[in-house]
Image (tube, rainbow, N blue to C red):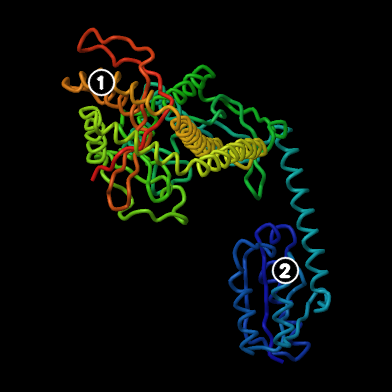
Amino acid sequence: MRVASYARVSSEEQAEDKCSIETQQEGIESHCQRQADTIVKHYVDSQSGRDTKKDREQFEQMLKDARLGLFDKIVAWRPDRLFRGLAPAAKLAKTLDETGVGIEGVILPIDRNLIGLWAWVAEQEIEAIRVRTQGGREGNIKRGNHHIRPPFGWDYDLDTKRWVGNDFEAKWVRQIFDWYIAGVSLYEIARRLNNAGVPTKNRSRLGWTAQKVSELVNSECYTGIAYYNKRQGVTNKPKDKNQWIQMSVPPIITKETWQAAQAKRQSNKRFSPRNTQAIYLTQHVLFCEECGKSFLIHSGNGPARLVCRGMTLHSHLYNCRKPKSVKYEPIADRLWEGVKAVLESEGSLEAAIQSRVEHVKQKGEAIKERLNKLSHELTKLKDEREIVITGFRKGFYSDEELQRQLEVIQEDEQGYKREIDSLSADLRLQGDAQSIHEQAKQLIPLMRARLDSNLADEDKQKIIKLLVRRALLSKFGDLTIELRVPAPDSFVSATSPHAGLPHYKLGRGDVRGFASH
């Protein structure tokens, strides 16, 4: 009979069970000689028998060759060489059933009808080995033996089984913390280390990166306190802190240095240019006419650009425009010119008020339905926020993922609230159009007087927020501005060219605006 020889080993099994590749193949060859069979091909893998994340290359090739009819029988040292999990066992059983290829074991017989049972037994055995290994490692660590590869700054002493300081690396650890506390950026620290020829712990050919430096300055182990068992082995999810095992290691920096570095880290997060909000006239008022989402502002190193939030966060749902981004400056100029046109012409505002009143009369019931739907959406967002926070507590999200999820929820919530305010004002507008018009006639001259001066973007933004309910940008580049009318109930007089704009309360009605092309 034509035979396929299969042997597999992992490093742990080869050390513990003495079943090397050579031992397995010798046994298989002797078995085939006794049966007068001919080995047509050897298949050898060095990988876990229950690894389901990637296929065993030779195992998969053997199954393919079986379908091609290259052999009549598979011979292995024992069942667990072929599989140690249900997934590979199922693959093997299916191939045997479809091709009629036989199977035999050298040390233990293999019944093809019991392959599933063998796989379950092997899976339980490997799990028991894992638990025993994990328990032994934790016990050794509690007794003071550090069975963990040390990070940059220490070496592992095979005799004492503990971390010992590496003087060369420890000197650079202290230097990195000093630079960081002094305000040197992560990228600059990485550049200095690479220029000085300082190797990373794993001798990476890429050298130091900002990410590696960030991980180092955020690692508490350099104060002499390290932790084991912080994350789950398979999922890498963080465990509860009461499950961590503390290890005492030789300190490299003082606790005061560590605390100063963490204070600097928090300061960097707070005052990072990425988090510093510049003044943009379109902020909170510009929306995509196609999907209804707001526009994000990407400044980067070049001119600011506007990007549809729907396309950015939900690209699989929205394809609002091409290209995806538009220049900020032209849109901001058109928005401001449109607002100026309203302030310089009372007729434009009167027409806008009348148009909005007619719109509300026709769409009154639809507006009420939309208000009810928005109220329901706000309730759903509250539930979603609770789900995200609960997921973070259970370790499903990192700090960064939690922050990102909450920011998305908050922006949706603010958008819904703005729409609720506008629609509520629409309903009030029906019986109060004349009063709103009178308010506008009082307010516009005050604002118009300021247009002659060179207004800063901050002052322009205040006027836009007072007058603009929202601006809609279409995929063709058309800009439609919907107006709101504030009421001059109270304001602070501007007594000098440098004084701030008056403080106005928002009026009770919004008015439909005009299109700017």
Indicate which disc residue 298 carries: none
Which quarter of the figure has residue 271? top left
Determine if residue 190 is in view.
no
Q: Label 1 neighbourhood size at 10 Å, few (<14), some (14-19), many (20+)?
A: some
Q: Mark 1 sits on what residue?
A: 447
**Whether residue 257 is situated above or below residue 194 in the rendered picture:** above
Give the residue type at disc 2: Phe
Determine if residue 39 is in view.
yes
**253 and 161: which one is in front?**
253
Q: Secondary structure at mark 1?
A: helix
**115 and 144: which one is in front?**
115
User: Which residue is at 59% across, 64% downward?
Assistant: 54
**Whether residue 291 is situated above or below residue 109 in the rendered picture:** above
For residue 426, side relative to residue 124 (left or right) = left
Give the residue type at disc 1: Met
Sequence order check, earlier mark of 1 and 2: 2
Of marks 1 and 2, the one in the foreground: 1
Q: Position of residue 110 (x, y in %)?
A: 81, 77
Q: Mark 2 sits on what residue?
A: 83
**197 and 114: which one is in front?**
114
Q: Position of residue 502 (x, y in %)?
A: 31, 15
